[in-house]
Image (cartoon, rainbow, N blue to C red):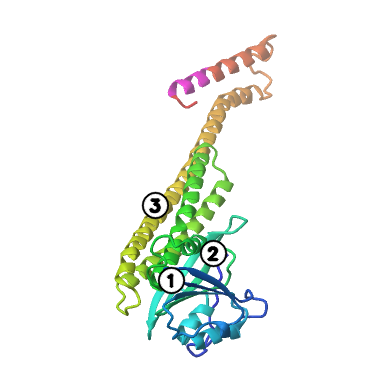
Amino acid sequence: MFKTRHPIPGTAPATLTPLAPGEGMPTKIHMVTYDTQGIKETPIRCVADLPPRDVNDGKLRWIEFNGLAEFDELRALGEKYDLHPLALEDVVHSGQRPKADSYDNQMFLVAQMLYRDEKGRLCGEQVSFFLLKNFLITIQEESESDVFDLVRERLRVGRGYIRKLGPDYLAYALLDAIIDHCFPLLECVGEALEELEDELLESPTRACIAHLHDYRRTLVHLRRAVWPERDLINALLHDESGLISKQTKVFLRDAYDHAVRIMDLVESYRDLTASMLELYLSSVSQRTNEIMRVLTVISAIFIPLTFVVGIYGMNFENMPELKQPYGYFLCLAIMAVIAGFQIAFFKRKGWL
């Protein structure tokens, strides 16, 4: 499922339109406070319990804001941390193209996270990032199916650079998790396409074409998500606001490389699906030609037999051989010889 929500036509820019009743998930807020020495995870009851933006205790904070049903909390979050209203509008109107926008002392990022649900269906969700000096705020509509568990585990154990560098590195780690999660999705698609290709060669059916179109649709969604995310990473690499450190840009180059590799795989699989569709059409055409060839040979065999039967089926009084005692069996024998001669001739020509 891919959720999209658009502004009401004619509304002023930066207008926050509340969700319809029952549309969004209940709001849950979770804060992770960390530095090189340790980490503390705190469930937050409401935005008022969050620390102010100008807190200066040497610690970094990751605020996870999940669920948009409680719209007043989202407004309060924007007011507390002075989040730009245009960025908040993009948070509410999901389905945004992945991008990076710089505002005063903050950066707004949008990414599309792809995953498979418990039924195996491909789903997509918008993840919004607000990168501040000592804060990273992420906003999701749902928190049950994100791909950030490994990043959380790295934070807890302090592995690598994640607790040594700033919130920009944490933002990179989350973006990298979103991008890298496309690799197992593409691996599943590649294996399924190989099996489908063998099935198309052996026994092409309409069900094969239905599966092929499903995979083509999956590749389209992957391309729509990853292609602009490559531009997003490129924009962060050339950021001059000072919110992205030089150390983090080194790692962003690796994420950019991963996005390029995914795009190469997506394009390769798209070409493969196109060739598989041509393979299906040629297989069906070849099978039809074989059927028509057999039917044509059968018709050609029966043409002279029909001719013989038509002659002796005429009821003229003075026709020869009508009084022969073995004329019926002689006629059948002649017809059998004609048919046998035709079959041998067709086999010699390779038509059978």
Query: What residue sits right under mark 2 in the picture?
Result: 146
Secondary structure under the numbered disc 1 in the rendered image:
loop
Query: What residue sits right under mark 1 in the picture?
Result: 35
Sequence-earlier tag: 3 or 2: 2
Say which residue appears at 49% left-offset and 69% top-offset. Answer: 39
Q: Is residue 111 left or right of residue 315?
A: left
Comparing labels 1 and 3, the label whose residue is closer to the camera: 1
Query: Between residues 234 and 325, which one lies in front from this camera angle?
Result: 234
Comparing labels 3 and 2, the label whose residue is closer to the camera: 2
Query: Between residues 127 and 306, which one lies in front from this camera angle?
Result: 127
Query: What residue sits right under mark 3 in the picture?
Result: 268
Say which residue appears at 58% left-offset and 47% top-offset. Answer: 207
Question: Which residue of the protein is positioned furthest toward the front in this rendering?
Answer: 37
Q: Which residues are magenta?
A: 341-349
Say which residue appears at 62% left-offset and 81% top-offset. Answer: 70
Q: Amino acid at mark 3?
A: Ser
Q: Is residue 147 left or right of residue 244?
A: right
Crowding around mark 1 (Cα neighbors within 10 Å: few <14, some 14 to 19, many 20+) is some
Q: Can residue 242 be seen from the camera position used here?
A: yes
CA–CA distance between discs 1 and 2?
24 Å
Q: Amino acid at mark 2?
A: Asp
Q: Amino acid at mark 1?
A: Asp
CA–CA distance between discs 1 and 3?
43 Å
